[in-house]
Amino acid sequence: MESALTNATSQTNFGTIDWVIVAVYLLLSVGIAFFVKRYAGNMTNFVSAGRAVGTWLGVATLTGTEMGLITVMYSAQKGFTAGFAAFHIGVIAGIVALLIGLTGFIVVRLREHKVLTIPEYYEKRYGRRTRILGGIMLAFGGLLNMGLFLKVGAMFIVGITGMDPDGNALKVVMVVLLALVLVYTVIGGMISVVITDYIQFVILSVGLLVTAWLAVDLVGGLDNVFETVDTYKGEAGFNPVAADSSFGFEYVGWMFFLGIVNCALWPTAVARALAMESTTALKRQYMWSSISFAIRMIIPNLLGVCAFVYVMTKAPDLQQLFSPTDPDVKAVDNLYAMPIFLGRILDPGVIGLLTAAMIAAFMSTHDGYLLCWSTVITQDIIAPLFKERLDNPTRIKITRILIVLIGLYILYWGLFYTGEEDIWDYMAVTGAIYFTGAFSLLFGGLYWHRASSTGAVLALLVGVTAVFGLGPVQDYVHTYIPGSIAERNITATDDETIEFEAFNEPDEREESAFRDMVIDFVMTPFEQAEPWNRNGLEGWTAVVRGQTGQEQKVEVDSSWAGEATASSWPIFEPKAGDTVSFYKPLSGARVGLMTIGFTLFVFILGSLIVPDRKQKEATNE
Amino acid sequence: MSDEPIAPTDLAPPPVMPPPVVTPPPLLPPKPVTTGWVFTLLKTVLTVLVVALITAGMILLHKMTGWEGIWKVTLIGTCGLFAILSVLVIVGGALDVRKLLHRLRERESSSESDSGD
């Protein structure tokens, strides 16, 4: 019997003509890789296109890389769940990119050093060991970050073409997409990446604008979209800092920092900056790209909002799929909402063009990322370990092998990762493993003469703590999260309610202004429950461990001093004798902001306490 | 013992050091006001003005129409700008691709050494 999801995806308008359009586009991309193969003979050409990229081509390649299918998917997901309030992410990204273009913050100074990668700069400023450690952190964070790209891209293709999402279609699409990207990245390096990025920009920009227009028109016009969002989401659908919004000030602040990261710290964007022919062209590239940085999120947000309007007003079957009224029915992953919506409303031919545009977006991101991470591993980890004895042909060969290995890894990770956070939040947290440390090293190294290698190493190591923002990691270490409640025995159960030894309100402590101040400061990010009060554990996560060692987690709906109720138990019915513990998950934004503060603190402290014996010049050597 | 007073060894007043002559730093000639300098200044003032005007406009719009108005203007504005950018990039990018291939061909023929590594 086919599932509701298979039934939903099968109602697409995708036809033969659309397959032809997609096939022609793919052949064109691979053909270009073969055409430019002869120029990719040395490492500078392979990695930086010979540092000969002009402004407009720079804008195209920066946009092509940063506007991937993954971006379209996660932004649509944010639009679907949060409405127009999600627009703030794109607006902030655009403003920050413009400011960086105007000031040249970090990127211009980095370009003046004529380095190929960020860790190469680390070596110039902090020494070889920092370069290797920085390269490892960069590769670790970057590869985790890229882990879900392939799966999410394949979900789009499956959703829009009407393949069976419950069968092997997802896996087959993942393999085919990966093979295509690997072929032309391995063959042509950055030159083919830059040129295909240009073609992809052409298809993508036209495709996105036309699709946005059609999507709004087919759900009843812009006014209807605004009215429907107002009806179903209220103020939270527009105001990102509304009391019941899923964002809040903390999230908005986090987005500002991510804006800087996306432009000035993220290696794939910085690689484009380092490939520019001059610093003037570089600044111009960023100023113009600020529009792309905003639009790459705003248009997909809009598509997600339109999908939400369509689901709520025109497709009752999809409404039951994505927001089931029965609490025992699990909602389908809302990443599928936008592709299913587009597959139903667009005509044949238009869907083919859109799919080609999205595959273009997918490929332009993957090629850039594959090339970037493999280059980092070759240039910043392997080559320094061999004390630079590797010649050019060997380096290119190693980079090509690494591209294939990274491709296989993302295939594996996409199939087995079990986290449930929004894709955008997953990416922000995994990226933070690298960029929280990198921000200190680059900002400090380029603008503060006292920055030292000890501070740099400490900052890089502390950046790893960002990994605690991931759901599965928090599940694993939840008992160590400050404020969490240790395991206690379940004494009785009644349907969805578990009973346990009651919590008692603690006696009032003797007041100590100093102690309270220190504890308040340290504990501010961690919520403290008052479980003895009614609903003191509402919204907290209960982890129930069975006597056989089986474990499940659920959100607490209501609670009282000695009992807690959930809407349903997803894995097993708890029994007396099982144990339960409680914790409040930390948001990715909070963990990210805490990590930034922590890395900056140890960087400054380490640099002041252990300065370098010989100050390294922050100039091109 | 003689009653003669012991003559002071140093009757002369201590020499007074003349105040150090502070030579004023040589006056640098004022920077000439070039066309480029005026242009940069005008550009900066204009940028600040445009940013201030947009901010003021957004605040006014928020007061009049709330978040709905802000997002409508943002959507239409960014889509319009992106359409213009797309045209510029499509035309300019094609020329840049030609230039890039030309340069790479030149380098290939002169077999320039790989200075990046």
Image (spheres, coloured by chain):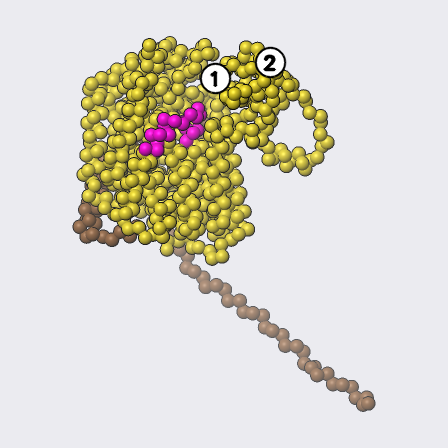
Residue B37 vertical placement versus A427 (above, below): below
Nearer-the-camera pick, B26 or A137:
A137
Q: Are marks 1 and 2 in contact (CB under 8 Å)?
A: no
- Could you tell me which chain the residue with mark 1 belongs to? A
* Residue occupying the point 41% across, 57% down: B30
* Residue A270: x %, y % from top left: 36, 41
Magenta stretch containing residue A414, yes or no?
yes
The residues tagged by marks 1 and 2 sit, at their Cα atoms, a distance apart of 18 Å
* Residue A72: x %, y % from top left: 35, 26
Q: What color does chain A have in the rendering?
A: yellow
Judge whether residue A123 can be spotted in this image. Answer: yes
Label placed on residue A492: 2
**Among the 4 quarters of the image, the one containing residue A282:** top left
Magenta span: A408-427
Q: Secondary structure at mark 1?
A: loop
* Residue occupying the point 21% across, 33% down: A30
Q: Secondary structure at mark 2?
A: strand
Mark 1, Cα crowd under 10 Å, few <14 / some 14-19 / many 20+, is: few
